[in-house]
Structures are given as C-alpha cells and as structure tokens.
Image (cartoon, rainbow, N blue to C red):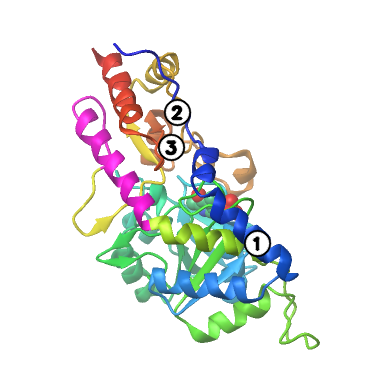
C-alpha cells in the first residue's frame, strides 16, 4: 500500500495557481481601465459565452440564483402561479420561485438524479406556469420529455443549468433547450469565478432585451427608467476572469469526464455508479455513487484521507423552510431513498491519476 494520501473534496487554490499569471494581468487591465461595472470586458465575455453555448444571448448577472429569479420575473411569473422543480436539488432551485412570489411544486427524480417526467406530469395543475428542470451533477435533464409536457400545457421551461456548463444533450449544449437558462459562476461550479457570478442564456431576443433592463435597475439608458428593476450584474473583473477560464472549460470538463470514467470502471462492481447515455455528455460537477452502506463507507473514506459530501442529504420538500407547502416524508420515495444512500466523490480537473486511483482503491478496500 502506498503512503497515506489526503484528497480534499475541492482544491480551488490549485486551479488558481495554474492560471494566476493571466488572472493577475486581467486584474491589472481592468484596474487600470477605471471601468468596474458593465463595459467591454463584460460584453466580450457575454459574446464568448453565447458562442460557446450556442445561444443568441448570454447576460452576466450577480449569481446563479439571480439568473433564475430574473428569468421568472421577466416571464411575469408571480403570486398565484405554480412552478415545478426537482426536490433533489440545491435549495436555490426552489427559493427563487418563492422569491418571485410563486409556489414551488416538487417532482421526484429518476435513477440518474434528474427530474422524472412522470412525476412532473402528475404535478401539473391549472396554476402551473413553468417547469425548472435541474441538470443535476452536470447531467442534462430529460429535456425532450419535459418540453413535450410543457408544450401540451402551455408552460415555460427554464433550465437550472447551474451545475452543467458545457454539458451536451443530443449534441447541443444545455442553456438553449428551453425559453431561458440560469448558470452559476460560483467558485465551486465547473466555470467558477472568484466570488459570486451568474449567467442567463436565451435565444429569445425580446426576453433578452427585457432581462438586460431588469438586471440594471430597469434602465433603458443612463437616465431613463422603463420598468422597476433590480441591481444584479456580473462585475467587470469577474467577467474578465470568467473569460480566461472559459477558454479552458472544455479541457477541464474533458478531464472530469475522464476521471468519471476511471471511477465508473473501478467501482461499478461495488456501488451504483452514474452511467452516460449515448445522447448525453455529462460534465460531472459531481460524481455521485449510491450504496446501502453509505454512512459506514463515508467514515471509511475519511479514514483513508478521502473527503466526500452528500448532494443533498435533505430533499427540499422536507426542509423546515418548506413546511408550509404541506409535503411529508414518503411523498417522493426515490429522492428520499437517494438522500440516504448517495455519496459524492472528489472530482475536479486538477486531481492527478495517482489521487484518482487512491480514491478507487479506498472505496474498494471497504468492500474487501
Ligand atoms: C449553485 C446552484 C444554484 C445557485 O447558484 P448561485 O450562483 O450559488 O446563486 C442554483 N441551482 C443549482 C442546482 C445549483 O447547484
């Protein structure tokens, strides 16, 4: 057995060091330019992000939650409306609906942790206005089925693409598969900046024009305010950093997919592993395994120096914040079972092959 290793769940400083010369230069350029809000550097990043994602418009905003919230506001979704989303997600997928004044309605998930179209169909009521499928772990949600349900009921589909920048569904990048999408540029996401950041994408020109005003106080220009808006912009500095990282995103995502494939091959005889279907390209924001012996395996991995997490230990419908919505344990059996059996293994482009095999051997040694 080689010497004991420590594998942190994330190591953001390692990636920072690998590009710090370029980041420093961007800091100097923006600093010396004297323009720190909006401007050319933001527009340049937005254009490159739109090209990368294959959409007509990309708009920088303050964070991923705001991206979703502003889309809901721009679509006029509010009091009296219902919006369906997955109960196994980060809490922001739901609170943005509440913040918009609407009611979140939850749906269960399938084996790949993504929203279950049957559960969505069962959740539609006359008040439903939109569906927010989450591309959880970086894997595209079943968009064809979701879009078909939406079409037959006249609903909007808003992608929560916070975890999935660069992922592909039938050859197309996520972000252009519904009316609009929200991405997060939080440091932990696949394209993370050095603070909070977010991105809205859409192919709808009118919606994009509306969102450009909404994120900037409702201003049509410097002096004229067309509508009541918000202050939710991506800082120029963060946009400059994001542009540097965007150029490397495909390579980083490819490395995550390679690590995922090593994990999958090494672990498939011991635990449930995520599998890629041939129409999708998951970017592995998380690599989530499942086992009935979750807590014991997690403790064993900790002893072996492998740091793990659970995404997410409490389904949203069972959170205290959701009490008033009237859900109870047992309502979404898949998500509830996964909450007790999931473990996220460390996965990021900077993990080297030795670390990856250490993780594989650490899991295997539990079952030995
Ligand atoms: C991170 C995340 C968000 C929120 O993004 P922030 O930039 O942190 O506001 C929303 N939905 C999902 C699924 C996320 O993982």
Quadrant containing the C terminus in the rendered view: top left
Dominant SS of magenta comes to helix
Residue sticking out furthest to the right: 223
Image depth: mark 2 or mark 1 in front = 1
2 and 1 marks in contact (CB < 8 Å): no
Image depth: mark 2 or mark 3 in front = 2
Q: Is residue 57 visible?
A: yes
Label 2 within 8 A of ligand 1 by Cβ = no
The residue at the point 41 percent across, 39 percent down is 350
What distance separates the C-alpha of mark 2 from that of mark 1? 32 Å
The residue at the point 61 percent across, 77 percent down is 211
Disc 3 marks which residue? 330
331 is higher (above) or lower (below) than 207 = above
How crowded is the residue under tag 2: few (<14 C-alpha within 10 Å), some, or many (20+)?
A: many
Q: Where is residue 52 in the image (x, y as percent from the top left)?
A: 40, 69
Residue 308: assigned label: 2
The mark that comes first in sequence, 2 or 3, is 2
What distance separates the C-alpha of mark 2 from that of mark 3? 26 Å
Q: Where is residue 286 in the image (x, y as percent from the top left)?
A: 40, 42
Q: Position of residue 294 (x, y in %)?
A: 38, 23
1 and 3 marks in contact (CB < 8 Å): no
Question: Is 122 on the left-hand or right-hand side of 243?
Answer: left
Magenta highlight on residue 175: no
Quadrant containing the N terminus in the rendered view: top left
Range covered by the magenta-colored residues: 250-274
2 and 3 marks in contact (CB < 8 Å): no
Q: Could you say which quadrant of the image residue 220 lies in?
A: bottom right
How crowded is the residue under tag 1: few (<14 C-alpha within 10 Å), some, or many (20+)?
A: many
Circle 1: element type: helix
Disc 1 marks which residue? 237
Image depth: mark 1 or mark 3 in front = 1
């Amino acid at each position: 057995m080689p010497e004991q290793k420590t594998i942190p769940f994330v190591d953001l400083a390692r990636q920072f060091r690998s590009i710090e010369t370029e980041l420093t230069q961007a800091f100097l350029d923006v600093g010396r330019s004297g323009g720190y809000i909006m401007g050319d550097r933001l527009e340049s990043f937005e254009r490159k992000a739109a090209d990368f994602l294959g959409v007509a418009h990309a708009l920088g905003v303050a964070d991923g939650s705001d991206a979703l919230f502003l889309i809901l506001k721009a679509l006029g979704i509010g009091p009296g409306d219902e919006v369906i989303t997955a109960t196994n997600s980060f809490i922001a997928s739901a609170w943005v609906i509440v913040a918009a004044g609407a009611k979140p309605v939850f749906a269960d998930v399938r084996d790949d942790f993504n929203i279950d179209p049957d559960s969505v169909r069962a959740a539609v009521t006359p008040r439903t206005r939109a569906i927010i499928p989450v591309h959880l772990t970086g894997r595209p949600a079943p968009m064809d089925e979701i879009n078909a349900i939406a079409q037959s009921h006249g609903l909007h589909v808003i992608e929560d693409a916070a975890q999935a920048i660069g992922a592909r569904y039938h050859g197309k990048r996520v972000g252009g598969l519904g009316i609009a999408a929200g991405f997060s540029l939080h440091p932990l996401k696949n394209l993370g900046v050095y603070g909070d950041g977010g991105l809205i994408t859409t192919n709808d020109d009118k919606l994009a024009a509306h969102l450009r005003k909404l994120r900037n106080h409702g201003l049509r220009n410097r002096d004229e305010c067309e509508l009541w808006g918000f202050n939710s912009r991506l800082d120029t500095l963060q946009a400059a950093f994001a542009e540097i990282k965007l150029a490397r995103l495909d390579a980083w995502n490819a490395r995550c997919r390679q690590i995922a494939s090593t994990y999958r091959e090494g672990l498939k005889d011991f635990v449930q592993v995520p599998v890629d279907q041939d129409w999708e390209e998951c970017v592995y924001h998380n690599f989530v395994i499942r086992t009935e012996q979750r807590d014991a395996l997690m403790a064993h991995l900790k002893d072996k120096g492998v740091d793990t997490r659970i995404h997410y230990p409490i389904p949203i419908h069972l959170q205290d914040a959701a009490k008033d919505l009237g859900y109870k344990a047992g309502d979404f059996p898949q998500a509830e079972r996964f909450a007790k059996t999931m473990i996220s293994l460390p996965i990021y482009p900077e993990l080297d092959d030795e670390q990856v095999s250490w993780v594989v051997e650490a899991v295997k040694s539990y079952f030995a």
